[in-house]
Image (tube, rainbow, N blue to C red):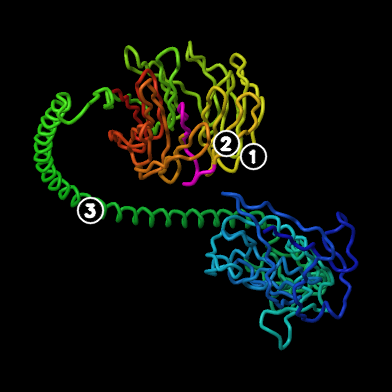
Amino acid sequence: MEASFAPTFSAAGAKAEGSSTYKQHRRTPSSSSTLTYSPRDDDDGMPPIGTPRRSDSAISVRSLHSESNMSLRSTFSLHEEEEDTQEPQVFAEQPSVKLCCQLCCNVFKDPVITTCGHTFCRRCALTSDKCPVDAAKLTVVVNNIAVAEQIGELFIHCKYGCRAVVAGKPGAYEVDPLGCPFTIKLSTRKEHEASCDYRPVRCPNNPSCPPLLTMNLEAHLKECEHIKCPHSKYGCTFIGNQDTYETHLEVCKFEGLKEFLQQTDDRFHEMQLTLAQKDQDIAFLRSMLGKLSEKLDQLEKNLELKFDVLDENQSKLSEDLMEFRRDASMLNDELSHINARLNMGILGSYDPQQIFKCKGTFVGHQGPVWCLCVYSTGDLLFSGSSDKTIKVWDTCTTYKCQKTLEGHDGIVLVWDIQTLQKVNTIRAHDNPVCTLVSSHNMLFSGSLKAIKVWDIVGTELKLKKELTGLNHWVRALVASQNHLYSGSYQTIKIWDIRSLECVHVLQTSGGSVYSIAVTNHHIVCGTYENLIHVWDIESKEQVRTLTGHVGTVYALAVISTPDQTKVFSASYDRSLRVWSMDNMICTQTLLRHQGSVTALAVSRGRLFSGAVDSTVKVWTC
């Protein structure tokens, strides 16, 4: 539901915009009495201010106008957020009901948008349990700047032109005909009231003088009979009026010493400050010394206890290690026995090439590994990590890291594959880039609700087109010979790789699509809610949903042979699963990583997996 807010109001006689921030207020019966009124359905034809509709993570601002009738006052008394202060607010004209909070029935004070999409005062939202419109739980999301600016444009009476309503509700105010006659914008009230001629002040010479208004202070000082000598703190007893004050200064014995007395005061004040600071430092050091003594005693006790626990754990660990070795030996014997029986045909046909095992681990990153890429012609594996580096691994001869590419700080960098040197820097998106894929001499980059298409010209990337119409973060991109597949929230869009137009949309379930793989016969996607969906590539009909993972499916990879096709899935649950696309069943679960598995890559029948444990593992048949 879109929100519309009423225009701001001003009293008659307002000056043109830009000429003044406050104006003379015309006294009318309605402006000096307390009224009640019902909310208006319209705002005199003024155009409403619309807000965006809600989509996924976006939250819209809904209308504050409810169906129930609500009686509001034309004069409002609002409590300021600061403690122990109460400022009267009397509006020059009735504010629109759409600028009023439905919890306190007053004009918004520090308006905020809540999770249900409605706007309330910040204090009301924090102290109320449920929304009065839809009974949703109230949680503050963000300040409503648009409403706050509208309220700041409303005109109110200066607080020195207001008085408490006699025999009225406590905290209610009305216009005082004897007070300040100006009305001012709410956003500039403090500036005006700080210099208002009707602001009450006290005589600086004697607090017992009657209260004054700022406009009368200058005249009072000329007549005041309680002017003291500026050197009274040094012992001068003179008290008189302005005329005798000037005469006294000519003969005051302290006047000639005023510079010396001032310097003495300054030095004494500095010494007092220094002494107070030293006292604070001494108290702090004593407190710290006491705490350190207590911590030292506690550390000594903990150290003795930990030594005892360490000895006990070491003994238990030795026993567990011996037990583990015995179990491992028994397991190896059992596996050898089963393999022998399988090869002999006792338990049916057996193809040893279909069992994947971990053959090694690349170690070197200092943070989670989030992406993997294999260079098609050189047996090089590239791994990107949260440690802001890209490591280049030799997967053919040395199986070592050839080079570490450093330079990322949130933008996209281009590197020369032959020299492994940075050759270009591209600022691609305003939001984080979630996925990249290249095809047909083009690079596709996915981010928030957008895919950018770049022409690759040497070491330059030139923006060719931006694909829009996406409903959320684009976390998965896969390119085939004729199509580009993109995954976002519960949607897979299929784009023609040449015309860059969307030719088909697949609707799915299970939250955002985190990974996509395409085989000769199927389209496969992994979702946030642990599911793997499979569609027929020709008919675009969903044929199966694969279950088994207990965490988000972050990555998918395909290894195809003339006989069969296997799909590999990597998950937040720290496991990899091997799926046979012939019968759609899981044939193997790989458990070697110590953290969520986030990335997969395939090269020459080998599978590479990257994980949050900062390692890359190599799997082969």
Residue 112 pos. (x, y %)? 62, 60
Start and end of the magenta stretch? 507-523
Task: Report which residue position mark 2 lands on.
Answer: 493
Q: Nearer the viewer, residue 215 or 277?
A: 215
Across and down, in percent, residue 605 comes to 35, 20
194 in relation to 565, above or below: below
Q: Are marks 3 and 2 in contact (CB under 8 Å)?
A: no
Q: Are marks 2 and 1 in contact (CB under 8 Å)?
A: yes
Crowd rating for badge 3 (residues with CA inside 10 Å; few <14, some 14–19, many 20+): few
Q: Nearer the viewer, residue 60 or 262?
A: 60
**Residue under the image location 73 percent in, 78 percent down:** 173
Is label 2 or label 1 in front?
Answer: 2
Identify the amino acid type marked 1. Gly
Instruction: Say what amino acid the circle numbered 2 marks.
Output: Lys
Q: How far apart are the two marked residues, 3 and 2, measured between alpha carbons?
A: 62 Å
Q: Quadrant of residue 507?
A: top right
* Relative side of 167 to 323, left or right: right
- Seen at 28% across and 27% down, the residue is 356
What residue would you read off at disc 3?
298
Query: Earlier along the polypeptide chain: callout 3 or callout 2?
Result: 3
Q: Is residue 134 something one can see in this rendering?
A: yes
